[in-house]
């Protein structure tokens, strides 16, 4: 009687990736998983294959949507391991559902070239959004994929395993909140990944100088430091701006506006945070407005909502 066995190869690497380890950013996570698949007749190995699955899990920042894409192939196939087949079925823990049909047993390409890998895509979303008001958040979303492998030479049902994201570290949050002042819309992110707002010195030198001076003076938010956290209440934001800029003349000199760090749209602002850690200065009006528009775009793209942490870096 023939038997089969296969297991994740935790020490196997492909390029810069280690099997089963996820990496990525606020919207996208990638991983490589590798298995050694072996068929034996009694105690004799009669075939083996290295099975590789690349994964990319994408969140949609303007839709209630989760997209899991995989590319699979078999390498170093010998003997009875020929014609290896893969089946995949998506699932999700938390307030979510994966609604794409499972992949039925499908033959894997052997030693595939870049355009020959078996490509699979599953889609899902958060549940509980129907008919709810703006302000709804669903977090703790964790999709997974059940997989099974077999070959025609195997004499029993396929063994099963699962691909998943590390719980807690890569939890997905979907929300229906106004981000950056736009109309409310759905969107999903990896909530524990802190996005980084980058300000280019050559584009906005006055704005960059205010940020650099604030961070040098002890204000949080620089990469490697404690983060800033988003403040969405309009009344509190106005109080932050008034407190930060109260030492500057009003009305301002023509063509100039007060710029402050930490930003008035954070809980670390001059009113809601520590005023002694706030730095402000007068900069060209166009720079201040451009800096505000870039920050609003950053909030929208990365779905930085109330009390979400983020970092700020000045790029030379």
Image (tube, rainbow, N blue to C red):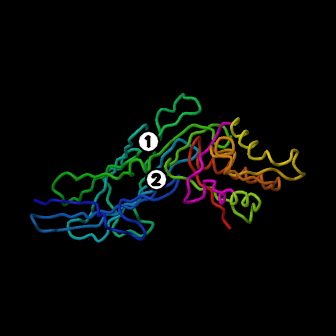
Left or right, 225 with reference to 316: left
Residue displayed at 45% across by 66% down: 115
Q: Nearer the viewer, residue 91 or 279?
A: 279
Q: Quadrant of the N terminus?
A: bottom left
How packed mark 1 is, by other alpha carbons closer than 10 Å (few <14, some 14-19, many 20 or more), is: some
Quarter of the rendering containing residue 287? bottom right
Instruction: Please determine whether, in this image, residue 115 is positioned above or below residue 281.
Output: below
Q: Residue 190 location in percent, x, y?
A: 49, 49
Q: Which label number is shown at residue 140?
A: 1
Q: Quadrant of the C terminus?
A: bottom right
SS under mark 1:
strand
SS under mark 2:
strand
Which region shows up in magenta?
A: 214-233
**The magenta stretch spans residue 223:** yes
How packed mark 2 is, by other alpha carbons closer than 10 Å (few <14, some 14-19, many 20 or more), is: many
Q: Nearer the viewer, residue 186 or 158?
A: 186
Quarter of the rendering containing residue 53? bottom left
**The magenta stretch spans residue 71:** no
Q: Residue furthest right?
A: 254
- Marks 1 and 2 sit apart, C-alpha to C-alpha, by 15 Å
Q: Residue 109 location in percent, x, y?
A: 35, 64
Left or right, 217 with reference to 42: right
Instruction: Please determine whether, in this image, residue 70 is positioned above or below residue 274.
Output: below
Sequence order check: which comes first, mark 1 or mark 2?
2
Q: Residue 202 location in percent, x, y?
A: 74, 66
Left or right, 204 with reference to 128: right
> Which label sits in the foreground, 1 or 2?
1
Q: Which label number is shown at residue 299?
A: none
Residue displayed at 37% across by 44% down: 91
Residue displayed at 10% across by 66% down: 43
Return the residue at label 2. 57
């Amino acid at each position: 009687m023939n038997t089969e066995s296969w297991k994740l190869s935790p020490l196997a690497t492909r390029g810069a990736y280690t099997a089963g380890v996820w990496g990525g950013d606020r919207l996208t996570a990638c991983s490589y998983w590798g298995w050694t698949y072996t068929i034996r007749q009694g105690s004799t190995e009669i075939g083996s294959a290295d099975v590789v699955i690349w994964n990319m899990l994408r969140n949609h920042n303007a839709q209630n949507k989760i997209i899991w894409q995989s590319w699979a192939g078999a390498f170093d196939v010998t003997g009875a391991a020929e014609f290896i087949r893969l089946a995949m079925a998506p699932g999700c823990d938390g307030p979510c559902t994966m609604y794409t049909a499972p992949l039925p047993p499908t033959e894997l390409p052997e030693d595939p070239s870049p355009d020959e890998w078996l490509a699979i895509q599953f889609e899902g979303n958060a549940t509980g959004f129907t008919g709810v008001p703006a302000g709804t958040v669903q977090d703790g979303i964790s999709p997974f994929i059940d997989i099974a492998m077999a070959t025609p030479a195997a004499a029993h049902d396929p063994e099963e395993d699962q691909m998943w994201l590390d719980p807690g570290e890569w939890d997905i949050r979907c929300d229906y909140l106004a981000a950056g002042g736009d109309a409310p819309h759905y969107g999903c992110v990896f909530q524990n990944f802190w996005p980084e707002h980058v300000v280019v010195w050559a584009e906005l030198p006055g704005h960059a100088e205010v940020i650099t001076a604030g961070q040098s003076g002890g204000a949080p938010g620089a990469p490697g430091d404690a983060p800033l956290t988003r403040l969405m209440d309009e009344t509190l934001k106005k109080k932050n701006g008034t407190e930060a800029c109260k030492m500057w003349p009003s009305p301002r000199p023509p063509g100039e506006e007060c710029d402050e760090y930490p930003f008035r749209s954070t809980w670390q602002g001059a009113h809601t945070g520590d005023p002694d850690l706030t730095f402000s200065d007068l900069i060209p009006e166009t720079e201040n407005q451009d800096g505000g528009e870039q920050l609003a775009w950053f909030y929208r793209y990365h779905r930085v909502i109330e009390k979400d942490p983020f970092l700020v870096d000045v790029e030379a």
